[in-house]
Image (cartoon, grey):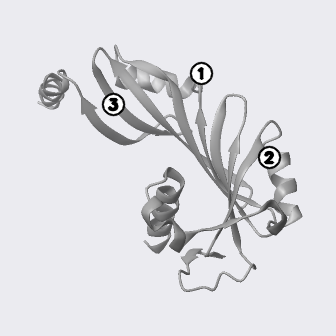
Amino acid sequence: MKKHIILFCLALLASGALSAQEEIFVAKLSKEKVPAVVIASVEQDFPDAVITEYKALPITVLEDGWVITKEKPMDGKYDTYYLSIKGKNFEGEATYDANGNLISSQEYARNIEVPQNIARAIGVRYPGWGIGKDHMVTTFYKDGKQKAYYHIDLMKGAEHEKVVFDGHGNEVKHGKTRGKEREERKMREMKEVN
């Protein structure tokens, strides 16, 4: 449970939802204050990207998860670095530990197609809906494995829905619907259940 809460906090931070409390959770840094191994890892992991902002997080990575240490003094020795990056067709954030290991990344992709298995799942689950050109991919890295989540904007006429799929094409979250077809869709879903 603690791991889920902390990952949720990191996701909020990555999405900018904590901007009002940002000073509590991050320290802005200059490039010189970031370990060279972290910079080298970013250049290797995102070869076509440029780092646009450097931050440190008062977070400690433990064997079984994360610990946010708001009270930790920001004395220049950090365990976790949060870097904003920008590439040709994407912007994003990447989180690294002090040894240069990639912990998580969040990429806002523009004009890039979603993987085929995600597109197929959308076609089956949401017939008649179109996939927006831009989407976000959140990826978590642990023990040499990665887990990706695709945040997709679906469109059908004036209606928009946000959905999240894992890398296998399974829907993990359904967002809010906007537009005049919302009630019609609810009615269709209710009829399908009965």
Question: Mark 1 or 3 closer to N-term?
Answer: 1
- The C terminus: image quadrant: top left
The disc, 1 or 2, on the residue closer to the chain's N-terminal end is 2
Residue beneath the point at 36% across and 17% down: 129
Residue 67 placement, left or right of 81: left
Mark 1 or 2: in front is 1
The amino acid sitting under disc 2 is Asp
Residue 58 locus on image (x, y percent): 61, 75
Q: Secondary structure at mark 1?
A: loop
Residue at image coords 45%, 21% = 131
Asked if the residues shown at circle 1 and circle 3 are in contact, with their CB atoms under 8 angstroms apart, the answer is: no
Q: At 64% from the left edge and 50% from the top edge, which residue is drawn? A: 93
**Which quadrant: the N terminus?**
bottom left
* Label 1 with label 2: CB-CB less than 8 Å: no
N-terminal label among 3 and 2: 2
Query: Label 3 to label 2, Cα distance in Å?
Result: 31 Å
Q: Circle 3 sits on which residue?
A: 161
Amino acid type of disc 1? Answer: Asn
Dot 2 crowding, Cα within 10 Å, few <14, some 14–19, many 20+: few
Mark 2 = which residue? Answer: 45
Residue 163 coordinates in the image, percent (x, y): 39, 36
Question: Label for residue 54?
Answer: none
Q: CA distance from mark 1 to mark 3?
A: 18 Å
Q: From the viewer's perspective, is residue 134 above or below residue 106?
A: above
Q: Residues within 10 Å of mark 1 (few under 14, many from 20)?
A: few
Mark number for residue 111? Answer: 1
